[in-house]
Image (cartoon, rainbow, N blue to C red):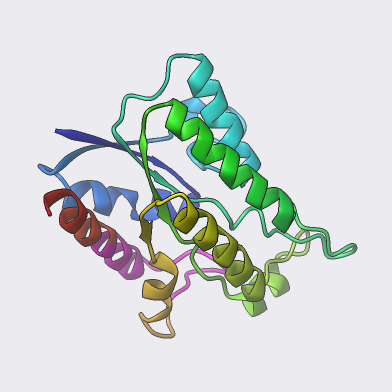
Amino acid sequence: MIKIYVLADSISIHYGPYLKQYIKGLVTYSRKRDKDDPELGANGGDSSSVLRFLEQKLKSGGLKADLILLNCGLHDIKTDPSTGKKQVSLGQYRKNLEKILSVIKMLKLSPVWIRTTPCDEKIHNRKRKSFYRFSADVKRYNRIADKIMQKNNVPVIDLYTFTLNLGKDLYCDHVHFHNHIREKQASFIAGWLYNFLTR
């Protein structure tokens, strides 16, 4: 049975239990866990953190998986309210993604990229004073990732567009989604995987 490993942000932690349920019998599911990373826990974090995690796995014997579902972006676009500086600049994000794909190749894994989900910047930037996020940055970083994945022939799951099309009542806070949205996201990814793995 094909083994899938998920390395992505907190959105994936939320839809993960549903996804694991929906693809049972098709694949073996695992993901980054709290004990794998004392600082970030199960969260993949930004692209620099994802790259660092994969490089550590490369040094320590790899990952027991065939396919890796991968995402980063929401943490990269965190913006300092005073300076406007991103946590990871667009240029560095591009370089990190290229390096991530290179390490994944050395790990002998097949990558599948999941596009970064939208955020509600009005609620986010009213509640979060330590850092901001902007919808325009989600789009910009997604476009960069799209180009890199296309250039490297990496399949892409467009969770961004799917989520936007689910309507208005999406968020339980500024960036995370209600349970019924998480279930739909998991169903969408599961359907994509069924089609991809059984064609």
In magenta stretch: residue 172: yes
Spot occupied by residue 42 in the image (x, y as percentages of width and height):
48, 38
Quarter of image, res 183: bottom left
User: Is residue 128 in view from this perspective?
Assistant: yes
Front residue (pair 165, 102): 102
Tell how many labels.
0
User: Is residue 45 in view from this perspective?
Assistant: no
Specify the quadrant that holds the N terminus.
Answer: top left
- Residue at (52, 30) in percent of width and height: 54
Spot occupied by residue 19 in the image (x, y as percentages of width and height):
26, 52
Front residue (pair 123, 106): 106
Q: Is residue 127 left or right of residue 112?
A: right
Q: In this view, does 22 lie to the left or right of 180?
A: left
Specify the quadrant that holds the C terminus.
Answer: bottom left
Extreme residue in the top direction:
60
Spot occupied by residue 9 in the image (x, y as percentages of width and height):
50, 50
Spot occupied by residue 170 in the image (x, y as percentages of width and height):
43, 76
Extreme residue in the right direction:
82
Q: Is residue 198 left or right of residue 50?
A: left
Quarter of image, res 91: bottom right
Q: Is residue 5 left or right of residue 8?
A: left
Region rendered in magenta:
170-188
In magenta stretch: residue 157: no
- Residue at (49, 22) in percent of width and height: 57
- Residue at (61, 63) in percent of width and height: 141
- Residue at (77, 64) in percent of width and height: 129
